[in-house]
Image (cartoon, rainbow, N blue to C red):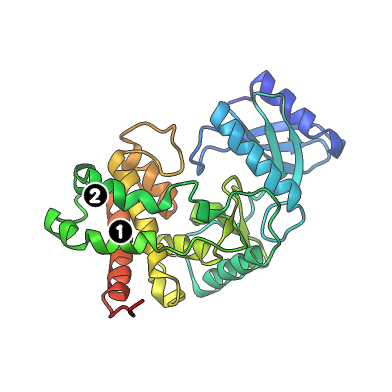
Amino acid sequence: MEPTPQEAAGVARALRSSRTVPVGWEPVTTGGHTPARRWVVRLADGRSVFAKIATDELTASWLREEHVAYSVLRGSVFMPAYVGWYDDGSRPVLILDDLSDAVWPPPWDDARIDAVLACLDSVAATPPPAGLPRADDDHLELREGWDEVERAPTPFLALGLCSPEWLRTHLATLLEAAHAAPLSGEALLHFDVRSDNVCFRADGSAVLVDWNWTSIGNPEIDAAFWLPSLESEGGPQPDAVLPEVSPELAACWAGYLGLACGQGADPLCAACPRGSASTDTVGLAVGRSAPRDPMDRLGRLLHLQHAATLRSWSRPRPQT
């Protein structure tokens, strides 16, 4: 497999400031949940870099968003080193540090979990760049999942995650919880923390990749949306890691995922066709996807989040 002439020219332009040129190309064919083309590129000066190249208008827009994050946050310990950028107006190219030698989870252990939590603390403590979308604007309509399930429950019920009776009994509670989810805040958020967006350096520190969903909001969001995927990959249950994370956030995320999978659309990729939920949706939502057990992963995710939400919301509520 070789790069197209347009790809090769774009990478060469992106590397101009590095005063070196590509001499070898290795396609990256694992991981990744967008049509963007990805390469490990060997350079004449002996280094290697990671190149991500847009393939359509959607991936081009995401890559431009990611470039802003990398360029403004350049030098942050929680992200790969920024190397270069070139945008010809149709197929932009982003060049980053090559993380091929990093360790990618799973498996998980206490040290790796602590490293991710420390990484998320560092992200949240970093002043966010101006102009980022705010989570409380709900630009992804996170709070609307259960509303859509209420309007058209058949696709969600077809997943086999619960009975119609269970849904009728608990839907009002889930709706109330999701709409009360505390999305607002002033912290920098990665907004897409999952196992294939996390790796570990030789010193054990965690690095986050794929920064095209960067937002500003409640610092609990990144951890709350990551923890269910941790459990699905053999790690501890969410409340064993961070017992104080808002159950309303759990209800919000569960509704979003349940709706997306019921519709057969990847929750973070509107361009994906109906029917991809059996693998890609679960991979995007709960970490590295295994085609043989995607519904089991999503089922456990929703079960844990439903349980956490209902335990909290079944307690007597103060009068207001």
Up the image or down, 113 lies above or below 166; here it is below
Residue at coordinates 51% horizontally, 56% vertically from top-left?
136
Q: Amino acid at mark 1?
A: Leu
Q: Quadrant of the C terminus?
A: bottom left
Q: Amino acid at mark 2?
A: Glu
Q: Quadrant of the N terminus?
A: top right
Residue at coordinates 49% horizontally, 71% vertically from top-left?
109
Tag 1's secondary structure? helix
Residue at coordinates 12% horizontally, 58% vertically from top-left?
165
x and y percentages locating residue 300 in the rendered image: 29, 61
x and y percentages locating residue 239 in the rendered image: 40, 74
Tag 2's secondary structure? helix
For label 2, count other residues whose C-alpha is less than 10 Å away and answer few (under 14), some (14-19) or many (20+): some
Up the image or down, 172 lies above or below 239; here it is above
Numbered badge on residue 5? none
x and y percentages locating residue 159 in the rendered image: 22, 47
Alpha carbon of mark 1 to alpha carbon of mark 2: how far?
Answer: 9 Å
Determine which residue is flagged by label 2. Answer: 150
Numbered badge on residue 175? 1
Q: Is residue 292 visible?
A: no
Q: Are marks 1 and 2 in contact (CB under 8 Å)?
A: yes
Left or right relative to 30: residue 238: left
Q: Give the farthest residue toward the left.
A: 165
x and y percentages locating residue 173 in the rendered image: 26, 64
Residue at coordinates 41% horizontally, 44% vertically from top-left?
267
Pick whichever, 262 or 294, lies toward us: 262
Quarter-wise, where is residue 253 in the image?
bottom left
Q: How many marks?
A: 2
Left or right relative to 151: residue 183: right
